[in-house]
Amino acid sequence: MAFNYKTFTDAVRQYVPIFNGKVTQANYNGLVKAVAIGLSKSNPGVVLTEPKWLQVARSQMGMKEIPGPKHNPYIVAGWKRLGAGWFTDDETPWCGLFVADCIDQAGLPYPKMFPRAKSWATWGKTSTPCIGAVVVFGRTGGGHVGFLVGESATNYYVLGGNQSNAVNIMPIAKSRKIAIRWPTTISNPDIDLPKMSGGVVSRNEA
């Protein structure tokens, strides 16, 4: 049983007046969960979920760096657990760490040089823009990496770490995109990116 997320959100905009043509991320999450429950109840064995790594990423929403001499224990422990124990703080750019941790928790391999955002540009296989795909951007002095969760005409909406020193969803210009990747061992899903709007466009995630 196939479910097209883009068709679903487009229909919500058209047929549900309370959303006034816009579907926020919170609206989207709630609606998709409700549909998933309805499908599973009506069709035992049918499961509608986002990729495991994206579920892990969403569970960390709101996690932040700790200002001052203390450091976020999630970040400090992550450097050591994933094999980059030479880093011991939360000031080091940690977007690659966040993506690696989510991918690792999903039982998938991650690049040896995962702290370097641009190393993700050759990880896995080339992908079309879809929910949960790893997206890599260029920026002054380096790169940035996160997970795709939506798009507008000019921006991708990215769930990532080290975005304003936190895990959140931010719009980033499509013109900065270097690569979109997907795990080699998993088939690309038929889950289009929902249309999103709002938010301050990120200029530099360092």
Image (cartoon, rainbow, N blue to C red):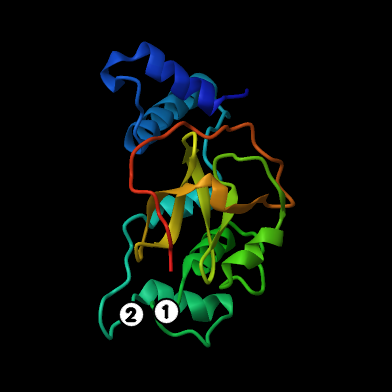
User: Along the horizontal axis of the image, is 43 left or right of 109?
Assistant: left
Q: Which disc is residue 76 wearing?
A: 1
Residue at 25 percent across and 82 percent down: it is 68
The secondary structure type at the circle numbered 2 is loop
> What distance separates the C-alpha of mark 2 from that of mark 1?
7 Å
Q: Residues within 10 Å of mark 1 (few under 14, many from 20)?
A: some
Q: Secondary structure at mark 1?
A: helix
Front-lying residue, 97 or 121: 121
Q: Is residue 114 above or below residue 4?
A: below
Question: Which residue in the protein does label 2 denote?
Answer: 71
Q: Residue at x 62, y 59 (%)?
A: 107
Q: Position of residue 61 (x, y in %)?
A: 36, 54
Asked where in the image residue 89 lies, by quadrant, the reply is bottom left
Residue 8 is tagged as none
Give the amino acid type for the residue marked by disc 1 in the picture. Answer: Val
How many numbered marks are there?
A: 2
In the rendered image, is residue 187 in sight?
A: yes
Say whether residue 110 is left or right of residue 155: right
Q: Amino acid at mark 2?
A: His
